[in-house]
Image (tube, coloured by chain):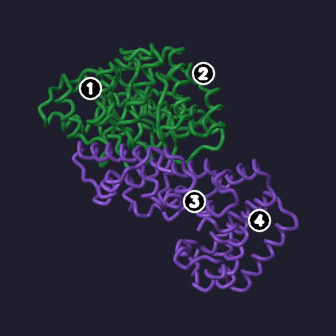
Amino acid sequence: MKVFDPHIHMISRTTDDYQNMQEQGIYAVCEPAFWLGQPRTSVGSFEDYFLSLVGWERFRASQFGIHHFCTIGLNPKEANNKRLAVEVMELLPRYLEKESVIGVGEIGFDDLTMMEEKIFMEQISLAMEFELPILIHTPHRDKKEGTSRTISIVKESGIRPEMVLVDHNTEETIRSVLEGGYYAGHSIYPNTKMSPQRMADIVKCYGTERIVINSAADWGVSSPLMVPRTIEVMRENLISDEDIEQIVWKNPIGFFSQSGRLDFTLLSERPKIDQSQLHCGNSILRGQEPYRAKGDELL
Amino acid sequence: MANINTDDFSKFLLKLLQNSLPTDKYSKLLDIIKTFQNSFNHMSFFRFYAGAGRIFGNTLVRCESNLAAECELSFDKAQFLSLWSNADMVRFVFLSLALERLNEKESINFVDDIYTKGDLKEQISLLRSLCFLPEAGRFVDTAIEALRSNSTIVFESIACFNEYPYRYFPLLHFNQMVLKIIYLGIDIDYIFGLRERGSSELIRALSDYVTERRSARRAVDLKVMNFLQYLEDNNLNTTGV
């Protein structure tokens, strides 16, 4: 089964992860811009990060036969830095034009501050101007309240509900998200957030329409293989392959294809691996013989 | 404890350092202080602030009861100092000297710069210091930023055994801090003035937290349940101030 992980921070992961992801059926990923653990002190760090997302990381993924896309945005946590927030907002339009950028994100709330709200609203307006879907982060703390405020703001903005993916849902928030007509994302973590079994229970309860799952793997304790792992658990729970495919492939593609920048035909095949290629003079190889696929075979 | 005058507190820390540091290190400290007093400049400050741990050590300083009394600090209230190292104390002394030379706006930016560009130990020293700085409330944005730290020890330095959040945090951020402490599995009793800052909004947030944990089939810490019960049993206003 082909898998699209619609929320994963590959910049924090290793080449082994890419290799394992490929072996587990992951064909495509979307990497939302987020915070790096260490707060940034200048706008230049944001710009270099955005450039990595559309450049080096995309190249690295392709070297393992995985399509890489991203969403660009100012994450809610760093939206609280007023000086930087203004400067980053000025950068965004340029990066939202890049061809591998398929949405605005991750945006939304973290601490539920006024500054977060202001930047969130501005980014929704930008998304509407660029006709891009938005990927919304919901806070880990005070999630119910955060999700409720998120929905109010999204409603008020006038953006079409199907252009909105509200992420990191739990049993507490999913109903209001689906009732609003939004896509509902779920981040499956090895220990916290949503577990594979809980996710399977949610699918049994709510079905597959506009349901999306992701690994949200980053620099913390997380796993880039949580989507394939959840597929196994859903199968154990007798959820049909057709339904599973809807969740892990068709729904994320359906959502992000609204950007007009996803070529479905291209996505259905892996990027042809040619490890002899370089990006800005850099190779992912460290002395190994470059692998060149003749057809669409894997490494 | 936060009512202590900055100068008096600085002098008190110097006495503790005199007892704690070897003679040559203490002399070096006095030399640096003299340099700052004669010709203060930002770069030398940042260098000494960063190097304080390396130069003066990160060992904890013992606070004797007679010294605490000299500073009109009851020994009980001086207990928070058991967490302070030589370097924490030295950094406070340096910072209090620096702030004397800066105007209000410069002071706010200066403190923020120390936090933003400090390593973990510098950040911890700064956060422990905040409550004792003159007009401490003006540094609240920096303190709030520390709540967002991914480093537990940095977060703990503002959230635990620190009077600053109790005195200066707006309701929203105080409540966020309480929730983050709970999420991190840290004892809520470490929060200074927790009960006094209880509010109807905190009851709402904690109740949502409990419901979410139960939906996820996860346990809720008994202390959290007891605290929520305490809040519900008391008539609380909405602001928590």
In the rendered view, would you say B9 is above or below A295?
A: below
> In the image shown, does B239 or B46 lie closer to the viewer?
B239
Mark 4 and mark 1: Cα distance apart in space: 60 Å
Q: Are marks 3 and 1 in contact (CB under 8 Å)?
A: no
Which chain is represented by green in the image? A
Which residue is the site of mark 3? Answer: B120
Mark 4 and mark 2: Cα distance apart in space: 45 Å
Q: Residues within 10 Å of mark 3 (few under 14, many from 20)?
A: few
Mark 3 and mark 4: Cα distance apart in space: 22 Å
Which residue is the site of mark 2? Answer: A93
Please give left or right for residue A96 compared with residue B205 in the image.
right
Which residue is the site of mark 1? Answer: A247
Horizontal and vertical percent for residue B215? 23, 42
Subunit bearing disc 2: A
Mark 3 and mark 2: Cα distance apart in space: 35 Å
Which residue is the site of mark 4? Answer: B97
Q: Of callouts 1 and 2, which one flags the residue occurring earlier in the amino acid sequence?
A: 2
Q: Nearer the viewer, mark 4 or mark 1?
A: 4
Subunit bearing disc 4: B
Local SS, label 3: helix
> In the image shown, does A241 or A37 lie closer to the viewer?
A37
Image point 32% across, 42% down: which residue? B208
Image point 24% across, 40% down: which residue? A196
Q: Nearer the viewer, mark 3 or mark 4?
A: 4
Horizontal and vertical percent for residue A116? 53, 34
Mark 3 and mark 1: Cα distance apart in space: 42 Å
Subunit bearing disc 1: A
Same subunit under labels 4 and 1?
no
Same subunit under labels 1 and 2?
yes
